[in-house]
Image (cartoon, grey):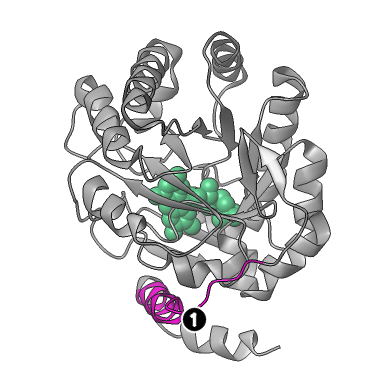
């Protein structure tokens, strides 16, 4: 009811400034009792999720507002993408709204405080839902050094993350998506699984490892990734990240560089999740994300085969009531 007024005020501001204000408000609001709507908890990847609706990566990159975001009802929150060293990301402007399409375009390029700082912050959280940490590589790390960057991030966050998402699909870090090629992906995932299991021997924390994919993958590449998931003990997949395709809308097509999210991504993401469910079988854990901006869209993502659902852009356009409405629709 009240969100349209707040939204008008926020949309009058530069998108990144508006986002910072919202995060700051949520950080301040987060100080007190954090209650998550009690629904039937969902078991997935050996974890107990209070409900199926989560916040997608990139909204709270530094984990500063997890407690406040938890108050919106999310059953899980994915923090990051974090990189080993702090970095400032690409030059501004780098976040754009396309209200006529219910979309955002971003080319932020992982601005973040660095994995160790974010891990220390998350250790102090009061939020009782699941917290995933999404990891990546620094912009100035060459592809040949990528494995070391991811392993360093995993080492920093392993003991405080409920799950770890390996981001090889953001379009705004040069070369990152090349890591989806199995010749890169296999050694990367093997190194991460090994490091995770080695660390677990010291303290017992063995968070599930998920891979986040791009909707722009060619069918052949996706087939190779699916085959890889059947040979490695990967715990789940997150689909999808933003798209660099611009088929949908003239207003969207005007903003050339960056990843597109929101309503124009929905049918692409649904098709991608459906394909993954068909090829990975009935029990492989899938987190579906892309264009979920209503209970109907959340239900469609579940029907496509997602065990859990995330959203980001829908929250910007529809406001916080979207979270509870989606929980009501899909539990
Ligand atoms: C401004 C913005 C920043 C994002 N940053 C990240 C990120 O750092 N890491 C990541 O894996 N995904 C990132 N994403 C992608 C989202 O997590 C999600 O996959 C995508 O936006 C599709 O969901 P949506 O249509 O509900 O927004 C970002 C999305 C937006 C809009």
Q: Which quarter of the rendering shows the N terminus?
A: bottom right
Q: Along the horizontal axis of the image, is 89 left or right of 278? A: left
Residue under the point 36% across and 37% down: 158
Note whether 33 is above or below 272 in the view shown. Answer: below
Q: Which residues are magenta?
A: 17-36
Q: Position of residue 222 (x, y in %)?
A: 58, 20
Q: Name the residue nearer the viewer: 79 or 178.
A: 79
Membership of 29 in magenta stretch: yes
Position of residue 277 measured from the top left corner of the image (x, y, whole percent): 74, 27
Specify whether tag 1 is near ligand 1 (CB below 8 Å): no
Magenta stretch holds residue 28: yes
Q: Which residue is tagged 1?
A: 11
Rendered image quadrant of residue 161? top left
Relative vertical location of residue 49 with respect to residue 27 in this rendering, above or below: above
Q: Nearer the viewer, residue 96 or 69?
A: 69
Depth check: give the residue in front, 263 or 256. 263
């Amino acid at each position: 009811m009240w969100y349209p007024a707040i939204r008008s005020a926020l949309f009058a501001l530069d998108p990144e400034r508006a986002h910072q204000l919202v995060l700051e408000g949520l950080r301040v609001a987060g100080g007190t009792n954090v209650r998550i709507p009690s629904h039937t908890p969902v078991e997935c990847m050996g974890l107990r999720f209070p409900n199926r609706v989560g916040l997608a990566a990139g909204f709270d990159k530094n984990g500063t507002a997890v407690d406040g975001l938890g108050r919106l009802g999310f059953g899980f929150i994915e923090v990051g993408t974090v990189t080993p060293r702090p970095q400032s990301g690409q030059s501004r402007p780098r976040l754009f709204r396309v209200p006529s399409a219910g979309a955002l375009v971003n080319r932020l390029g992982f601005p973040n405080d660095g994995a160790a700082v974010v891990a220390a912050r998350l250790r102090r959280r009061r939020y009782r839902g699941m917290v995933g940490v999404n990891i990546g590589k620094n912009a100035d790390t060459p592809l040949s050094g990528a494995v070391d960057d991811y392993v360093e991030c995993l080492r920093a966050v392993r003991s405080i993350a409920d799950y770890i998402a390996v981001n090889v699909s953001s379009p705004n870090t040069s070369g990152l998506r090349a890591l989806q090629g199995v010749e890169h992906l296999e050694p990367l995932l093997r190194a991460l699984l090994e490091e995770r299991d080695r660390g677990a021997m010291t303290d017992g924390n063995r968070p599930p490892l998920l891979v986040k994919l791009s909707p722009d993958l060619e069918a052949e590449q996706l087939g190779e990734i699916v085959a890889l998931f059947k040979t490695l003990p990967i715990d789940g997949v997150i689909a999808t990240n933003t798209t660099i395709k611009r088929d949908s809308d003239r207003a969207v097509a005007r903003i050339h560089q960056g990843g597109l999210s929101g309503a124009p991504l929905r049918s692409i993401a649904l098709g991608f999740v459906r394909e993954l469910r068909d090829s990975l079988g009935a029990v492989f854990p899938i987190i579906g994300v892309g264009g979920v901006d209503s209970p109907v869209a959340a239900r469609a993502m579940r029907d496509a085969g997602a065990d859990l659902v995330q959203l980001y852009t829908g929250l910007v356009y529809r406001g916080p009531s979207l979270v509870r409405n989606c929980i009501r629709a899909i539990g």
